[in-house]
């Protein structure tokens, strides 16, 4: 059976397996066992199937975990969009960006804790993609998770649309990710307000990288994760996201810009359900965070290993690519002989 590994590296097998083992195997321990097995076999993974974790596609535990990601993301999107709409609908005068940022931080921390025992607590393609690059989860598991997150985000946006009026839907763009919006100008003529696409693109890259560097880092480092525990780690993640939402919406001082998305699934869900201008520059909310993930992964490669416990991560992207190329070359040589 494939190893069931969550965000913090805990074994996420079903309850029967857990009760049989009577302990939770940390990712560091699993990695050590895999490394020892690799010593015997001289190298690991030994097949392309193992390199990409293709066996996990047929694992019921992975699909059960993805159901948790789907439902968790649906609730997350419903809550975040409802927070954005209700806060600005009430017309908060004092620091209008602060209240939703605080509520967003609390919501994210609670939902990550709720889904952590089920799937590892991702609820965001940025986390799943980054975890895949670093080697915490396989490419196959990441693909399943991200698909579930996008479906869940769409369901969450549909839930929001079903409980608000068409006027609120139009006025607040379903609480989705916007770079610009069309608003009545002087004389009733429609004008476009917001920020430039390039500015939004850089904000996505910077905010997503800070998000990974300042919080997700702790989850990937097994020593910090063990010392802090999931409650503190997920609380820090929520606080960091809340701060970044506040900073990104405040620093631009432009209405029409919804702030850094840092969660492509959430942006996609509202765009699918609402459509229209939510598709304008939508690529920014995918390209920016994914570039940040690559930059963060490169950062983890160059720092001293004693500062980041990353040894033995089976699905590390560089290791997978290097091993896959080696396996392909080996097969070609075998056929040549």
Image (cartoon, helix red, strand yellow):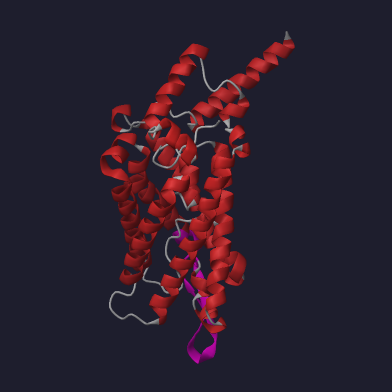
Quarter residue 151 falls in = bottom right
Side of 198 relative to 334 (left or right)? left
The stretch of residues the image draws in magenta is 177-200
**In the rendered image, which quarter contains the N terminus?**
top right
Quadrant of the rendered image containing residue 99: bottom left
The residue depicted at 29 percent of the width and 28 percent of the height is 306
Residue 20 appears left or right of 306: right
Q: Is residue 251 visible?
A: no
Check residue 93 for magenta coloring: no
Question: Left or right of 324: which side holds 335?
Answer: right
Q: Using the image as rendered, state which of residue 224 and residue 194 is in the foreground.
A: 224
Quarter of the rendering occupied by the C terminus = top right
> Going 52% across and 74% down the picture, which residue do you hit?
173
Q: Quadrant of residue 247?
A: bottom left
Q: Position of residue 243 (x, y in %)?
A: 32, 60
Q: Is residue 55 above or below residue 69?
A: above
Q: Is residue 243 visible?
A: yes
Residue 197 sits inside the magenta stretch: yes
Q: Which residue: 40% across, 72% down?
A: 254
Q: State the residue lying farthest toward the top.
A: 337
- The x, y position of residue 257, in whole percent, is 45, 69
Residue 59: % across, % down: 59, 38
Q: Residue placed farthest to the bottom in the image?
A: 187
Q: In the shown orientation, is residue 36 left or right of residue 59? A: left
Q: x, y (%) of residue 123?
A: 47, 53
Q: How many marks?
A: 0
């Amino acid at each position: 059976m494939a190893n069931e590994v969550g965000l913090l590296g805990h074994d996420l097998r079903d309850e029967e397996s857990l009760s049989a083992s009577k302990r939770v195997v940390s990712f560091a321990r699993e990695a050590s066992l895999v490394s020892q097995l690799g010593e015997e076999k001289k190298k690991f993974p030994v097949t392309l199937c193992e390199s990409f974790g293709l066996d996990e596609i047929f694992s019921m535990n992975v699909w059960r975990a993805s159901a948790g990601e789907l439902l968790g993301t649906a609730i997350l999107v419903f809550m975040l969009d409802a927070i954005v709409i209700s806060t600005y609908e009430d017309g908060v005068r004092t620091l209008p960006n602060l209240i939703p940022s605080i509520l967003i931080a609390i919501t994210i921390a609670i939902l990550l804790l709720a889904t952590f025992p089920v799937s590892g607590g991702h609820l965001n393609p940025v986390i799943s993609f980054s975890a895949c690059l670093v080697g915490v989860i396989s490419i196959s598991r990441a693909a399943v998770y991200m698909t579930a997150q996008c479906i869940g985000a769409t369901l969450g946006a549909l839930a929001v649309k079903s409980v608000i009026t068409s006027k609120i839907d139009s006025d607040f763009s379903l609480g989705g990710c916007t770079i610009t919006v069309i608003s009545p100008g002087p004389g009733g003529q429609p004008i476009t307000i917001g920020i430039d696409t390039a500015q939004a693109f850089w904000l996505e890259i910077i905010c997503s990288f800070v998000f990974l560097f300042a919080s997700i880092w702790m989850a990937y480092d097994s020593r910090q994760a063990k010392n802090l525990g999931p409650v503190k780690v997920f609380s820090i993640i929520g606080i960091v996201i809340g701060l970044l939402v506040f900073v990104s919406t405040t620093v631009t001082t432009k209405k029409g810009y919804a702030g850094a998305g840092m969660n492509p699934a959430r942006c996609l869900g509202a765009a699918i359900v609402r459509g229209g201008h939510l598709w304008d520059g939508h690529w920014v909310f995918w390209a920016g965070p994914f570039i940040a993930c690559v930059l963060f992964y490169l950062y983890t490669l160059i720092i001293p290993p004693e500062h980041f416990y990353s040894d033995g991560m089976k699905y590390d992207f560089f290791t997978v690519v290097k091993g896959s190329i080696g396996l392909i070359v080996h097969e070609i040589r075998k056929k040549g002989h």
